[in-house]
Image (tube, helix red, strand yellow):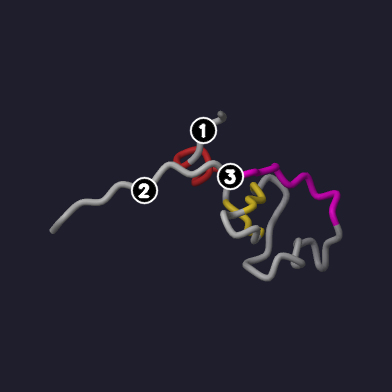
């Protein structure tokens, strides 16, 4: 099977500290899966916001 590498793309991200509007303990205003405190909130290449678990974020992204 052919192998592919993800293109390098810079994204904006901030770690969710629980201080944003939440419902039942979850950040739900993103339109994606709920975010929990400690998750990273990423702004994608099209401006969309989505949560990412800290362990996945650490494996996928590095500071620039």
The location of residue 13, given as percent across then percent down, is 65, 44
From the top left corner, tell me how far across and down residue 21 is, in percent.
86, 60
Going by the picture, which residue comes out furthest to the top? 64
Mark 2 burial class by Cα count in 10 Å: few <14, some 14-19, many 20+: few
Residue shown at 79% from the left, 61% from the top: 25
Quadrant, the N terminus: bottom left
Write the start and end of the magenta stretch as one range. 12-20
What's the residue at 45%, 40% (across, down)? 59
Regarding mark 1 in the picture, which secondary structure is present there?
loop
Q: Which residue is mark 3?
A: 11
State which quadrant residue 26 falls in: bottom right
Residue at the front extreme of this rendering: 46
As measured in the structure, the alpha-carbon distance from the residue carrying label 2 to the one carrying label 1 is 14 Å
Which sits earlier in the primary sequence, circle 1 or circle 3? 3
Q: Look at the numbered disc 2 and give the secondary structure of its residue.
A: loop
Q: Which residue is mark 2?
A: 6
Check disc 1 and report the residue beneath it. Answer: 62
Q: Secondary structure at mark 3?
A: loop
Along the viewing direction, whichever of 6 and 14 lies nearer the viewer: 6
What residue lies at 63% left-to-right and 56% top-to-bottom?
51
| Quarter of image, res 64 | top right
Q: Seen from this angle, which residue lies furthest left?
A: 1
Q: Answer with mark 2 or mark 1, whichever residue precedes in sequence.
A: 2
């Amino acid at each position: 099977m052919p192998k592919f590498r993800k293109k390098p793309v810079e994204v904006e991200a901030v770690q969710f500290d629980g201080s944003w509007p939440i419902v039942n303990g979850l950040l739900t205003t993103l339109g994606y899966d709920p975010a929990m405190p400690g998750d990273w909130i990423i702004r994608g290449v099209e401006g969309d916001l989505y949560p990412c678990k800290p362990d996945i974020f650490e494996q996928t992204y590095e500071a620039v």
